[in-house]
Image: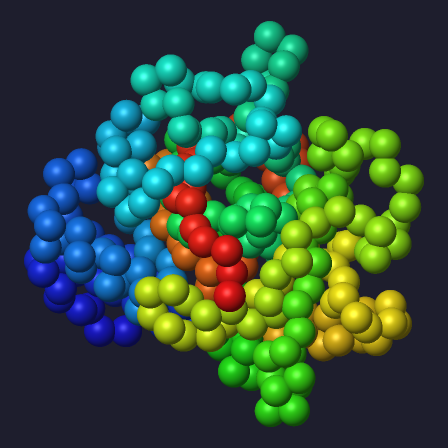
Amino acid sequence: MATIELAGLRIRPTGAGLAADVDGVDLRALTDGEFGALRRALHDHLVLRFRGYSIDDVEFQHLAGRFGELYASPGYTRSRAVYNPAAPMVTIVSNVVEDGAPIGEHGDGELLWHTDLGFEEVPSALTFLLAREVPATGGNTSFANMYKALDSLAPATRERIARLKSKHQASHSSYGAKRPGFRDIETDDPRELPGPIHPLVRTHPETGRKALYLGRRFGGYVPGLPLAKSEALLDELWAAVDRPEHVWTQQWQVGDLVIWDNRCTMHRRDPFTGQGRRRMHRLMTKGERPV
């Protein structure tokens, strides 16, 4: 794909269903023009990758904070309240264990398709993920374009879901474990699991574009439908998520910084059990109630 020049930035689309590489910019000292160009590029490509960046946690938190109010992960998803007192909003996604305790969350298994904090009443808008340590293989992250997923549905299905909502279950993580605070739950019936109700089609507050908006598949439920019909509809919608033409996969290198928009993408992670240490530093901005 041809490189796009925008306010001095060099933007190279991946040629896949979404995402672009960006260089020619110092993320630690963005001008107003460069910052505006980055926001535009994120709206156009949904996922942006910056390779080989050396940025400390304080600079990282400052960068993310320019995009919006920072939103720490809920306390029950974190192994400790603060990892770096100088950058308290940074959380760690890692399989590393030190002194017998994990230094971060989510281990080394597969993380199924999800959108960050969709299980909250007000989900996150953007996620920033910075690779500090990566294994030689495994742990790749795939992203799906939910604008394209919606557009690929049959017209009758699009018309039907425009009026419907779905539950984004809050009790289980993307690797299937019960979250702290929900470990006394004994049912697998999605109608009984906790979680907020969000529209199946949401409108992006900045672009005005409509995207399919799904939670984790386990525990999903469309209120008002019999369970069997809800399951059938969700199966149809989920089949549109990971079609090859909708997906791009990030193969991580140390120093990679990836920014994505949770309001119009989903993502998943390949397992890397036994492949080595992986330590990612993460920040999120607060979004808005989906409409």
Query: Where is residue 147 shown, x and y percent of the image?
Result: 47, 74
249, 36: nearer the viewer? 36
Q: Residue at x 34, y 23 (%)?
A: 87
Report which quarter residue 17 is drawn in.
bottom left
Name the residue located 74 percent from the left edge and 67 percent from the top edge: 222
**Residue toward you, 97 or 40:** 40
Please say whether residue 279 is visible from this viewpoint: no
Q: Residue furthest bottom?
A: 155
Residue 137 visible, this orientation: yes
Determine whether, in the image, residue 244 is placed left or right of residue 11. Answer: right
Residue furthest top in the image: 99
Q: Position of residue 11 (x, y in %)?
A: 22, 62
How are the colours assigned in the image? rainbow
Please state the horizontal and vertical placement of residue 15, each as a whole percent of the image. 36, 72
Q: Quadrant of the N terminus?
A: bottom left
* Front position in the image: 46 or 134: 46
Relative to 161, is 268 above or below? above
Residue at image position (59%, 46%) is 120
Count of marks overlaid on the render: 0
Rendered image quadrant of residue 285: top left
Task: Identify the residue at image location x=32%, y=26%.
Answer: 57
**Would you say 244 lies left or right of 205 here?**
right
Q: Nearer the viewer, residue 157 or 13?
A: 157
Q: Position of residue 102 (x, y in %)?
A: 60, 20
